[in-house]
Image (cartoon, rainbow, N blue to C red):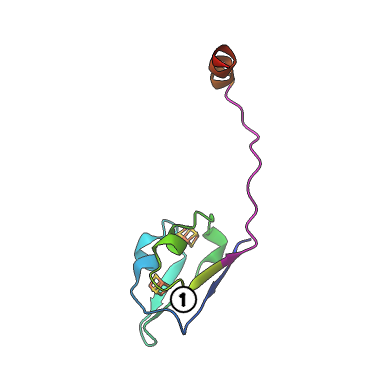
Amino acid sequence: MVEIEIDENACVGCGSCVDDCPNDVYEMDEAKNKTKVVNADDCMACLSCHEICPAEAMEHKNIHVAKRLYIDRRVNDILNKII
Ligand code: SF4
Ligand code: SF4
C-alpha cells in the first residue's frame, strides 16, 4: 500500500491536491487549513498531487511499479514488422 506523508508545516492549505486527486484520497481539515489523508488505500500512485502541490508538502512511499503482464499481440505484430 502506498504511504503518504503530508508535511503540515509546509502545506499552505490551497486544496489543489483535494481537487486534483481522482480517488478522493485527501480532505481539507478546515480547522487547521491543511489537507489530510483520509483514503490512502485508494491511492494509485499517479503522483498527480505531488506534481501539483506548490509547497512540495507531500511524500509518497512504498510505491512499486506494476509489472506489465498484458501483451496485445496486435501491437507486437506491428512492432515486429517495423523493427
Ligand atoms: S498519487 Fe494520485 S491517486 Fe494518489 S493521492 Fe495523489 S493524486 Fe491521488
Ligand atoms: S496541494 Fe500541497 S499545499 Fe496545497 S493543500 Fe495539498 S498538500 Fe497542502
Q: Position of residue 68 (x, y in %)?
A: 63, 37
The residue positioned 38% from the left and 70% from the top of the image is 54
Q: Which residue is mark 1?
A: 36
In which quadrant of the rendered image does the N terminus lie? bottom right
Residue reaching furthest to the top: 81
Judging depth in this view, the residue of 29 and 47 nearest the camera is: 47
Q: Position of residue 78 (x, y in %)?
A: 53, 16
- Residue 9 part of the magenta segment: no
Question: Would residue 24 be seen by someone viewing this image from the given angle?
Answer: no
Which amino acid type corresponds to the residue marked 1 in the rendered image? Lys
What segment carries the magenta color?
60-72
Is 51 placed above or below 4 here?
above
Dividing the image into four equal quarters, which quarter contains ligand 2? bottom left
Q: Position of residue 55 (x, y in %)?
A: 41, 74
Prevailing secondary structure class for the magenta stretch in the rendered image? loop
**Left or right, 67 with reference to 26:** right
Residue 10 found in image quarter:
bottom left
Q: Is mark 1 within 8 Å of ligand 2?
A: no
